[in-house]
């Protein structure tokens, strides 16, 4: 049964209550990624990273054994150039106190997770955190697995534990909530052009049309 924080308006994401954990977007994990086109995941996780920065949502970067598995991909690191990823030996991020202490001290309960692979390094911490009372959201298009089946089964498994699957554009839209919030809306326009594909192209075209003078004669 869903708890009260997942009913009605309270079920939607709020930037002041959110914290993001990005897990193991590294070369080794991408090497056996078969559930999605890698470019799709890179675009989604980069868009999510930039949105978190726009809304001042704390974002934890973490890698596993990066000396062998490779550094965090440049697209994410470029969004947080001064932040060194937490390098773990634990497969389950939620067993590393360097990560969980930051989340706990933040006091934020809406936990947003994305990572590689969905069936391992995403499912493990998501399931554990949900049991500890966090309202867990998994950004499925910023995750990937060794096969389509592995990704799908992992998402189904997590749903059984009360975890909410969501995509990165939905996360951003719930954080924005109202286009009258002009301080963030202007930044989201740039984000749309860069990362929302055809929507971004259409938006840029709309701006072109709006800014094209109408001949007077």
Image (cartoon, rainbow, N blue to C red):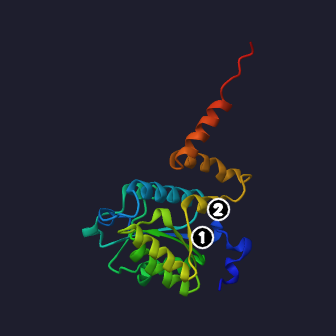
**Which residue in the structure is indicated by mark 1?**
18
The answer to which image quadrant residue 11 occupies is bottom right
Identity of the residue furthest to the top in this view: 217
Q: Position of residue 207 (x, y in %)?
A: 64, 35
Measuring 63% from the left and 72% from the top, which residue is drawn there?
Answer: 17
- Quarter holding the N terminus is bottom right
Indicate left or right for 184 with 129 as reference: right
Of mark 2 and mark 1, the one earlier in the sequence is 1
Q: Which mark is residue 45?
A: none
Q: In terms of depth relative to the viewer, which is nearer, 131 or 63?
A: 131
Query: Does residue 130 appear in the picture of this structure?
Result: yes
- Quadrant in which the C terminus appears: top right
Tell me residue 36's x, y (percent): 41, 60
Q: Which mark is residue 175?
A: 2
Q: Are marks 2 and 1 in contact (CB under 8 Å)?
A: yes
Look at the picture and state if 70 lies above or below 65: above
Q: Residue at x 49, y 85 (%)?
A: 128
- Point out residue 38 in the picture as x, y percentages from the top left corner: 38, 57
Q: CA distance from mark 2 to mark 1?
A: 9 Å
In this orientation, which residue lies closer to the viewer: 200 or 89?
200
Residue at x 59%, y 40% (from the top left corner): 202
């Amino acid at each position: 049964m869903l708890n009260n924080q997942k009913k009605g308006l309270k079920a939607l994401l709020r930037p002041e209550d959110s914290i993001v954990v990005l897990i193991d977007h590294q070369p080794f994990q991408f090497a056996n990624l078969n559930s999605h086109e890698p470019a799709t995941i890179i675009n989604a996780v980069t868009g999510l990273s930039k949105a978190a920065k726009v809304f001042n949502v704390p974002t934890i970067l973490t890698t596993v054994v990066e000396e062998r598995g490779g550094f965090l991909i440049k697209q994410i690191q470029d969004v947080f150039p001064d932040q060194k990823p937490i390098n773990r030996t634990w497969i389950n991020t939620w067993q590393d106190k360097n990560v969980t202490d930051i989340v706990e001290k933040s006091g934020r309960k809406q936990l947003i997770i994305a990572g590689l692979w969905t069936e391992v390094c995403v499912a493990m911490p998501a399931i554990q955190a949900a049991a500890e009372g966090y309202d867990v959201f998994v950004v499925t298009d910023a995750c990937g697995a060794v096969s389509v089946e592995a990704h799908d089964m992992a998402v189904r498994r997590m749903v059984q534990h009360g975890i909410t699957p969501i995509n990165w554009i939905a996360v951003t839209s719930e954080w924005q909530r109202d286009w009258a919030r002009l301080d963030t809306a202007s930044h989201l326009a740039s984000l749309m052009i860069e990362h929302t594909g055809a929507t971004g192209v259409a938006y840029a075209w709309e701006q072109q049309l709006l800014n094209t003078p109408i001949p007077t004669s």
